[in-house]
Image (cartoon, rainbow, N blue to C red):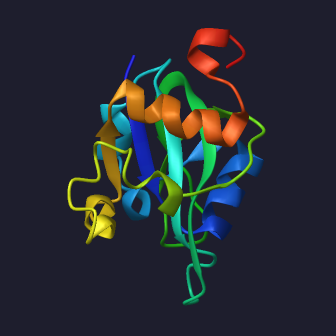
Amino acid sequence: MRYWIGVASKDHVSRGVDGGFCQLCHGKAQPLKRMASGDWIIYYSPKERFEDTLLCQAFTAIGEVAGDAVYPFEMFPGFVPFRRDIRFLPAQAAAIRPLLEQLSFIRDKKHWGYAFRFGHLEITEADFRLIAERMLGYDPVVSGRG
């Protein structure tokens, strides 16, 4: 089992949660292929909306990778991103700033946004559990409620 962070605006994350899927890195297939069924993903949203500057800076969704398929989906003519099915859990957004000192993948606490620059990263189980506890109020891996 592996643990991942995906990066997308909160409005885009909401579309994925509603549809039960994730897209990463503007629809690229490769990041999705790195994940396996049973892995976990948490979305970090730097902004509220893709086309806006209003900051969000929170973890906004959490879910378990479901199935093995990475598949194309035509959103509109000429744009066919790849998706992967995710079983999202009902969760509350968790602001990142109170967690910065505790997250091991944030190596430079002063320039913490740098960790998210590629749009997809693997994190440790400890980091996952810390964020999950803030979002869910429980650990979904230990509790079996995932």
Split into 4 quadrants, where in the image is the C terminus? Answer: top right
Up-down relation of residue 139 to residue 46 (above or below): above
Report x, y in % for residue 17.
70, 48
Q: Which of 6 and 37 is in front in this view?
A: 6
Tell me if residue 96 can be seen.
no
Please report the residue visible at 29 percent of the width from the left and 42 percent of the height from the top: 104
Report x, y in % for residue 45.
54, 64
Split into 4 quadrants, where in the image is the N terminus? Answer: top left
Please report the residue visible at 36 percent of the width from the left and 45 percent of the height from the top: 103
Relative placement, left or right, of 10 versus 33 is right
Relative placement, left or right, of 103 versus 97 is left
Report x, y in % for residue 143.
67, 11
Report x, y in % for residue 39.
46, 24
Up-down relation of residue 70 to residue 139 (above or below): below
Tell me if residue 46 can be seen.
yes
Residue projecting furthest to the left:
108
